[in-house]
Image (tube, rainbow, N blue to C red):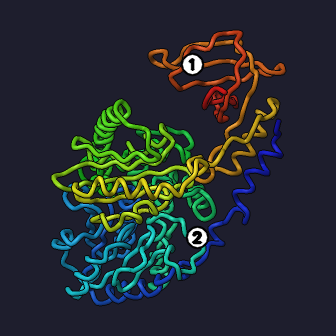
Amino acid sequence: MIDLSDVEKRLLERFPNGFIPLSKLPPPSNLKDSTKASKRVVQAIERGERITIIGDYDVDGVISSAIAYLFFHKLGIDVEIVIPNRFKDGYGVTPKLLERIDCDLVITVDNGIHAHNSARILKERGIDLIITDHHNPSDTLPEAFAIVNPKQSDCPYPYKDICGATVIWLLLGELKRLLNVDIDMMEFIDLVAIATIADVMPITNLNHTIVKVGLEYFSKNERVSNQILIQELFSNQTITAEDIAFQVAPRLNSSGRIDDAIHSFNFLISDNYIEASYLYSVIDRFNQTRKEIEKSIYQDIVDEVDNSKPILIIRGEEFHEGVIGIVASRLVAKFQKPVILFSQSGEILKGSGRSIGNIDIFYLLQSASNLLLKWGGHKMAGGLSLHVSNFEKFREVVYRAMERYSPKDFLEKSNIFGELRIDNLNFDLYRLLHRFEPFGEGNEKPIFELRNGIVVQSQKIGKSGEYQKLVIEKEGIYVEVLIFQDMETIPVGKSISFLYRPHFSTFRGTFKIQALLEELI
């Protein structure tokens, strides 16, 4: 049995250096090459050179592009924004993409750290390249004028696990300092927060501060896209990291997955309410399409998969390239093992990998890199492509690479705190947990146990009665329990034990605590 002091102690262990106020953040100049890159941009501005920003089609890449565009727009400088189309261009700065670029300076955001061929092409054309990225570098770096990436081995910036939007935000902060212009970088922090959540960065250290402050700014920022998102999705409620992860991020991601990410980019930068409303309706339709495709692929795999190997490596000619990453994540959750899914286009397979526990997907891809056309990523996720003829070889190499892992490496870090005293399920618990919000990757909301509670009320809820609401009694204290899983009806009088997450709400001025059931134990 644990109490609130035990909960507090465990949560504090996640923040050994305490909470970091924005005023105490390391200066952007600590990022290797940030000053060098900023000076080159200043030079480009002074000379009237043409600048092209090359982004990516996921949320982090789109938001990184939007932040860069909005910053330069405030300076009165037109920059060209190029966001690769997943289906026509592929990922990142490809030689094919460069065919339509004519400028003096290229700045990548959220990509470029593996763009060796494209870097050489740009150098031959006399175009300077500034790479800003956050993905793991390989042993050799592209030939660029400057590379701003905290994961470079010789970069002194202390916070390595930041998203691409944070990297460009910091770089633009250094550019602002050199230009000595009056631009409030806090205008973009809500966007940086969305990207941090969407890219599943650990919500600790710098990221915790960015997300906490960014969520507060989300409602205050008068950006048109924010107004529409609040109107369509949130009404007047307080917006949480979970809201961003499950409502905002999938919509912003959907246009790049189904059609072209430029729709989400245009939505974010629009200052016209009618235009932005239309763009929101477009990306919302893409999101509905994405859900339908995802559900179909997921069910087909679950029905037919051979689950005998330590990693699922599956290809399908009918798999939609835009959703295989999401499906891979769902399969990881179901089968509790890493997954690499491939969609096939002609003789080329394009894949997306997701991992679990302590299994490093980047290492797995690296072990087979000689078979791959392109690849990249980090510990928990990666992307790759290869010839169909190399698929079986790739699978065997990865199977061998998996031999280094033991069963304990497949286990998620336990977030079960233990059985909380029933009388501690109160407003004091709310205040304690509120101190450590926002929760997310690396700072997960605690899960507690409740043992031997007696069901005193049981009812069906939901449009079709597919969910349940129970009232549990233990030690004379009553707790409302919500069940949003497909589960047999739990009858009155039954004694149950379960895992739950506490949920707090206010209804008509009355504070309410509920338990969201995770699973029966």
| The quarter of the displayed image where residue 513 is located | top right
Left or right: 425, with 514 as reference point: right
Residue 394 screen position, x and y as percent: 33, 57
Pointers 1 and 2 in contact (C-beta within 8 Å): no
Whole-number angstrom distance, CA of label 1 to CA of label 2: 43 Å
Residue 311 screen position, x and y as percent: 44, 47
**First along the sequence among labels 1 and 2:** 2
Q: Secondary structure under badge 1? A: strand
- Considering depth in this image, is 305 or 451 the residue closer to the camera? 305
Q: In the figure, 68 relative to 274: above or below?
A: below
- Considering depth in this image, is 390 or 28 the residue closer to the camera? 390
Q: In the figure, 497 relative to 185: above or below?
A: above
Residue type (three-letter) at the residue carrying disc 2: Tyr
Left or right: 37, with 104 as reference point: right
Residue 119 screen position, x and y as percent: 28, 80
Q: Residue at x 80, y 29 (%)?
A: 422
- Considering depth in this image, is 518 or 19 the residue closer to the camera? 518
Q: Residue at x 81, y 33 (%)?
A: 421
The residue singled out by tag 2 in the image is 159
Q: In the figure, 341 relative to 371: above or below?
A: above
Q: Which circle marks residue 468 in the picture?
A: 1
Residue 230 screen position, x and y as percent: 45, 43
Asked if residue 16 can be seen in this view, the reply is yes
What is the crowding at mark 1: few (fewer than 14 residues within 10 Å), some, or many (at least 20)? Answer: many
Q: Quadrant of the N terminus?
A: top right
Q: Quadrant of the C terminus?
A: top right
| The quarter of the displayed image where residue 469 is located | top right
